[in-house]
Amino acid sequence: MVSLRTLAWLKTRFSAREPSPEQRARDLIAAIDAGGVPLNPARVNDIARKLGLEVSSKASMTDTIARIREALQRL
């Protein structure tokens, strides 16, 4: 038998909408400011592109994160 906690988790996992690009960017910046280090540059680039930024595959992740911060300030 499945516990209520598991059912609640499944419900949130499969019924939740994907966060907006803006929310994903805010979450990324909040995690970095809290001391986290992004491990997946492709995810950072995806967030930047969905915010409307052009990102070179050769751009450093720190530059991309700085551009995401600037984009969030304009929103």
Image: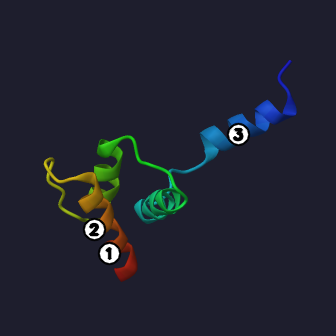
Residue 30: x, y in percent?
52, 62
Whole-number angstrom distance, CA of label 3 to CA of label 2:
35 Å
Whole-number angstrom distance, CA of label 2 to CA of label 1:
5 Å
Rendered residue at 21%/53% (across/down): 60
Residue mark closest to the camera, 1 vs 3: 1
Does label 1 or label 3 sit earlier along the sequence?
3
Mark 3 residue element: helix
Residue 75 visible within the image: no
- Which residue was labeled with disc 1? 70
Foreground pick, 13 / 36: 36
Foreground pick, 35 / 38: 35
Residue 33: x, y in percent?
50, 63
Does label 3 or label 2 sit earlier along the sequence?
3
Q: Which mark is residue 67?
A: 2
Q: Amino acid at mark 2?
A: Arg
Mark 2 residue element: helix
Residue 33 visible within the image: yes
Q: Callout 2: few (<14), some (14-19), or many (20+) C-alpha neighbours within 10 Å?
A: some
- 72 displayed left or right of 58: right
Mark 1 residue element: helix
- Which residue was labeled with disc 3? 11
Rendered residue at 41%/47% (across/down): 38
For residue 70, above or below residue 29: below
Whether residues under marks 2 and 1 lie with C-beta atoms below 8 angstroms apart, the answer is yes
Considering the image in quadrants, where does the N terminus appear? top right
Q: Callout 1: few (<14), some (14-19), or many (20+) C-alpha neighbours within 10 Å?
A: few
Q: Amino acid at mark 3?
A: Lys
Whether residues under marks 3 and 2 lie with C-beta atoms below 8 angstroms apart, the answer is no
Residue 26: x, y in percent?
47, 65
Residue mark closest to the camera, 3 vs 2: 2
Which quadrant of the view contains residue 11? Answer: top right
Foreground pick, 12 / 75: 75
